[in-house]
Image: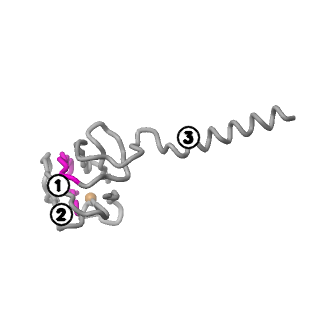
Amino acid sequence: MKRITALILTLAVAGLVAAASGHAGEAASPITAKSKLLLTVGPGFTITLKTSAGKSFSSMKRGTYTILVRDKANIHNAHLSAPGGVSKKTGISFVGSMTWKVKLTKAGTLKYRCDAHPTSMFGSRKIV
Ligand SMILES: [Cu+2]
């Protein structure tokens, strides 16, 4: 009986450790401006922001980021904004790639969205 209890405890602790370390492929700590970013919109109804290595992240340090924007549909756009007057966007009819240099000087929330579908295609990251 004791052995079974110990086994259950071990499994529970392992589960907690796995939960604390976050999702696979997601940076656990804030990324820095050394990471280049990829903002991809379309061709379906999706907009994603990842590192160029394909990693997800939830927070980022202040700094000047290079963002490669890939706008893959003429019904969507990419619109990014952040505290300090940061506002960049592609045109909705635009299809193609462009590179943005984005200077994040203030803590807060970086937001990105498609202006044509702002309630379904959006996301945010914490700036620290
Ligand atoms: Cu859209």
Residue at the spot of label 2:
86
Tell me which label, 1 or 3, sits earlier in the chain. Answer: 3
Judge by depth and name the residue closer to the eye, 36 or 104: 104
Tell me which label, 2 or 1, sits earlier in the chain. Answer: 2
- Image quadrant occupied by the C terminus: bottom left
Q: Position of residue 39 (x, y in %)?
A: 24, 49
Element marked by disc 3: helix
Residue at the top extreme?
A: 3
Q: Is residue 84 left or right of residue 21?
A: left
The part of the chain drawn in magenta is 63-81
Distance of label 2 from label 1 (alpha carbons) = 7 Å
Q: Pointers 2 and 1 in contact (CB under 8 A)?
A: yes
Q: Report the residue at 30% width, 65% height from top.
A: 118
Q: Report the residue at 17% width, 47% height from top.
A: 66
The kind of residue tagged 1 is Val
The image quarter in which residue 76 lies? bottom left
Q: Pointers 2 and 3 in contact (CB under 8 A)?
A: no
Judge by depth and name the residue closer to the eye, 62 or 95: 62
The quarter of the picture showing ligand 1: bottom left
Residue 102: mark: 1
Q: Position of residue 50 (x, y in %)?
A: 30, 45
Judge by depth and name the residue closer to the eye, 114 or 37: 37
Label 3 neighbour load within 10 Å: few <14, some 14-19, many 20+: few
Element marked by disc 2: strand
* Residue 90 painted magenta: no
Q: Is residue 76 left or right of residue 18?
A: left
Label 2 neighbour load within 10 Å: few <14, some 14-19, many 20+: few
